[in-house]
Amino acid sequence: MAAPKFSSHTRSISLPSSSHPLLVNAEEHLQRLKSSEAASSPSHSLACQRLAALKNLYECLDDVLQLPLSQQALSNDQEVLDGSLILLDICGAVRDIYSQVNESVQELESSLRRKRNGDLADEVSSYMISKKQLNKMISKCYKELKKAEKNCNLTLVNKDSEKVPLVDLIKEVRETTLTVLESTLSFLSPSKAGSLVSKLLSKNASSKGHSNIAAMEQIEMELHLLNKNNSNVDVVKGLEPLESSIQELAEMLEIVFRLLLKTRVSLLNILNH
């Protein structure tokens, strides 16, 4: 499966040596996070690492926004405020998708445990209906991500001639945040559907050993095992670690969402001061 391609910008904000230490620290957090963009395979561990790094970056950025220099640099920058709302909306959408996928998998596991063996056509059908709705949500989210990335890139290219380090930093953080959110979404489902049929027909079709396969495809592959007379217990064992990974990422996305909200509140306070 081909994972979505992310932008590989290597720009450095090149903050002047006289910049505030907190501003320099935030830049260092940003550059460390950007260095992880080279790895493109969707995996739980990589998604966790990137979200944890994003959390650290926004905690550092919040400290920067409390500085007096922030009031001077951002007092008239409506574009930065608008960008914070876009990030909040997209992060909220990715978080909601993860929450709904997690709920669907938990319901499926519950049905498998309850019935143990027997006809599960209704339960599988219910999941597939849920999956169609989730795929629509994911597709819409990818479109919003691509639109936001395009607008962000245009903003970064068409900078004012007078360089403002804090404004540049925030715009770079926005670009990297979009990349991380897209990467996180790709763990659930790729931006372009691959040939799942060939994977399902594979002799060894199983979530085990296929860490490069998106989570929703892994779920479908586990369900395919039910048609091969595998016990419900075996399928549940295949779903449990996947459900745990999805739940952990959903919780981390909630933390990032709250930090994005806090950043937006700080920006509103600065602009309305």
Image: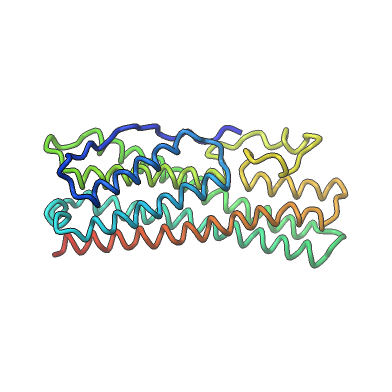
Give the percent coordinates (x, y) of residue 176.
37, 43
Relative to residue 18, is residue 104 drawn left or right?
right
State the residue lying farthest toward the bottom.
Answer: 114
- The tally of labels here is 0
Examine the rendered structure and indicate whether residue 151 appears above or below residue 110. Answer: above
Give the percent coordinates (x, y) of residue 177.
38, 47
Q: Quadrant of the C terminus?
A: bottom left
- Which residue shows up at 46% across the image and 47% down it? 50
- Which residue shows up at 61% across the image and 62% down it? 103
State the residue in front, 37 or 127: 37
Picture quadrant of residue 32: top left
Give the percent coordinates (x, y) of residue 216.
63, 48
Relative to residue 121, is residue 107 drawn left or right?
left
- Which residue shows up at 70% across the image and 57% down it? 240
Relative to residue 78, is residue 212 drawn left or right?
right
Relative to residue 64, is residue 116 drawn left or right?
right
- Which residue shows up at 68% across the image and 64% down it? 107
State the residue in front, 83 or 273: 273
Colouring convention used in this rendered image of the protein: rainbow
Q: Quadrant of the N terminus?
A: top right
Give the percent coordinates (x, y) of residue 96.
50, 59
Picture quadrant of residue 255: bottom left
Query: Would residue 188 be visible to someone looking at this image?
Result: no
State the residue in front, 134 or 3: 3
Query: Would residue 22 be visible to someone looking at this image?
Result: yes
